[in-house]
Amino acid sequence: MIQDFDSVLKKILHYCSYQDRCISEVKTKISTFDISSSDKERIMQLLIDEGFIDDKRFANTFVRSKIHLKKWGVNKIRMSLKMKGISDDIISEALSEIDRDFYREDLIKILKAKKINESDDFKRKAKLAQYAIQKGYEPALVWETIKNLEL
């Protein structure tokens, strides 16, 4: 059953209004509706022109939320944005706005808060590093921080 353009537009506008979306997410959502490809393109163009979807704004919001709320590292954020189809230029620009001092302090807090029951000091540090690297922190920064903290 072919759906009406206005009803699909209304649903997509609602989809974009309650959370920032990137272009690829909206394209995926629009593809679930049974409307012509020209109508899909019209909806996408309308959303872009009216500012409902903007990959730059999405990337900036994504980076801020993952750094501050999820405590993700740069590598994990970069890969997640790439998987969402965000261009490398936009990703680099969004990541450049990270406060490096805050980022390092977050890494220190994460490392200090992680409890690892390991008597061997080398294994304990390796597990700590593995945990931080898994969260997306850069390996060189993780090892440097562990060495400087003497955890």
Image (tube, helix red, strand yellow):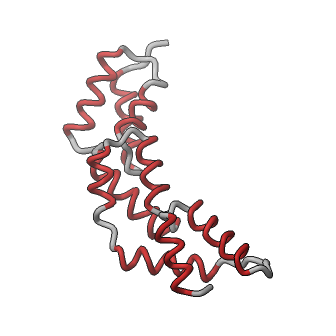
Report x, y in % for residue 114.
66, 77
Question: Left of 16 or right of it: where is 146?
Answer: right
Residue at 77% across / 79% down in the picture?
120
Residue 94 found in image quarter: bottom left
10 and 129: which one is in front? Answer: 129
Q: Is 90 located above or below residue 74 in the figure?
A: above
Residue 122: % across, % down: 70, 76
- Residue at 40% of width from left, 56% of height from top? 62
> In the picture provided, is 51 more to the left or to the right than 110?
left
Name the residue rendered at 38%, 20% in the picture: 4
Q: Is residue 135 left or right of residue 120?
A: left
Looking at the picture, how far across and down is residue 69, in whole percent? 49, 68
* Residue name at image x 41 percent, y 28 percent: 30
Q: Is residue 87 above or below residue 5?
A: below
Considering the image in quadrants, where does the C terminus appear? bottom right
Q: At which x and y percent is residue 53?
A: 30, 43
